[in-house]
Image (cartoon, rainbow, N blue to C red):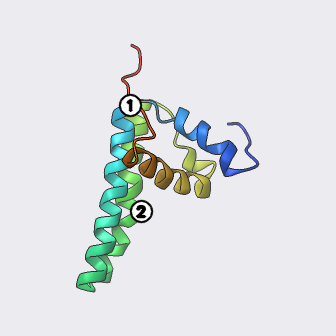
């Protein structure tokens, strides 16, 4: 895995590891569910739900990598950059800055 001196250098690599639209969709789903669970926990004050956040956030993402991308998640090498990149990728998707095409067979 290449070495990165900054998040700006890392993010294009991160996107290259998330080419398959189903993998990206699973990341978006996991991130969205994380937001929903945090809001639910805050509103209901049922704090035990917060323990589910890593399973929800990483579970969907890692399924996308293992089943559709067939690669190892960058989280293992760059946990903080990867966490930040998940949220930037979701923001870029919501704002229309990412194009989604099926990869060639």
Q: Is residue 8 above or below residue 66?
A: below
Q: Which mark is residue 54?
A: 2
- The quarter of the picture where residue 10 lies is top right
In the picture shown, does residue 48 fall above or below 85?
below
The residue at which mark 1 appears reads as 100
Q: Are there few (<14), some (14-19), or many (20+) residues within 10 Å of tag 1? A: some
Picture quarter with the C terminus: top left
Where does residue 29 sit, x and y in percent of width and height?
31, 50
Q: Nearer the viewer, residue 26 or 65?
A: 26
Distance CA(mark 2)–CA(mark 1): 26 Å
Circle 2 sits in a helix, a strand or a loop, which is it?
A: helix
> Residue 18: where, in percent of width, then height?
47, 36
Residue 44 sits in quarter: bottom left
Residue at 42% across, 50% down: 90
Residue furthest toward the top? 105
Assess disc 2: are there few (<14), some (14-19) or many (≥20) residues with their C-alpha within 10 Å of its C-alpha. few
Q: Name the quadrant of the N terminus.
A: top right
Q: Is mark 2 in CB contact (under 8 Å) with mark 1?
A: no
Residue 51 has which mark? Answer: none
Residue 66 image point, x, y percent: 41, 36
Name the residue at 45% across, 46% down.
92
Query: Which residue sits at x=50%, y=33%?
Result: 71
Left or right of 59 on screen, residue 18: right
Q: Earlier in the sequence, mark 2 or mark 1?
A: 2
Helix, strand or loop at label 1? It is loop
Q: Residue 104 appears at what percent x and percent y?
A: 41, 15
């Amino acid at each position: 895995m290449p070495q990165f001196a900054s998040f700006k250098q890392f993010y294009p690599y991160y996107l290259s590891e998330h080419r398959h639209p189903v993998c990206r969709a699973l990341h978006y789903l996991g991130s969205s569910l994380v937001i929903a669970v945090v809001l639910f926990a805050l509103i209901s004050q049922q704090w035990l739900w917060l323990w589910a956040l890593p399973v929800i956030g990483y579970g969907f993402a890692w399924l996308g990598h293992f089943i559709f991308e067939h690669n190892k998640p960058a989280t293992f090498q760059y946990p903080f950059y990867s966490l930040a990149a998940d949220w930037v990728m979701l923001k870029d998707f919501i704002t229309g800055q990412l194009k989604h095409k099926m990869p060639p067979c």
